[in-house]
Image (cartoon, rainbow, N blue to C red):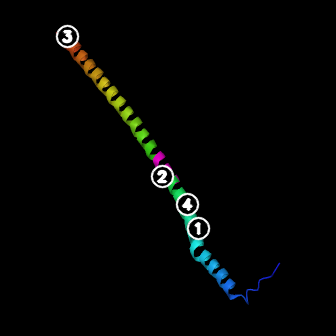
Amino acid sequence: MKRINFRKNNKLRRKVISTIAIVIICVLPALSSSLIYGKIGQEYKVQEAIKGLYMEGKKLSMGINNIFSDIDKEIGIVCQGNDINNLEKDSLERMLGYI
């Protein structure tokens, strides 16, 4: 096996140095940025998923609140109707009692 002497072989030294420079200048920043953006993208996806779950929960709670408010309105109307009926009965009984 022949040993290569970089000091004497300028062409080989230039090729090796230019290859290392290309790797350092072009490939490493692209790899690091893709890794960084990949992590940021994953965090963004997780944040979007959490936001989506929060919005769905908010819609669900609003729907439940609307159902309960509708029930409260219906119960309130029924109670008011019963109160009015009771008042009318009381007033009729009073009127009949006076007659």
Q: Give the magenta-colored segment's residue range.
A: 46-53
Q: CA distance from mark 3 to mark 1?
A: 95 Å
**Against 65, is 3 above or below?**
below
Q: CA distance from mark 4 to mark 3?
A: 85 Å
**Against 74, is 57 above or below?**
below
Rendered image quadrant of residue 38: bottom right
* Residue assigned mark 2: 48
**Against 57, is 4 above or below?**
below
Q: CA distance from mark 1 to mark 2?
A: 25 Å
Residue 7 magenta-drawn? no
User: Closer to us: mark 4 or mark 1?
Assistant: 1
* Residue assigned mark 3: 96
**Residue in the foreground of this view, choosing between 58 and 72:** 58
Q: Which mark is residue 38?
A: 4
* Residue assigned mark 1: 31
Amino acid type, callout 3:
Leu
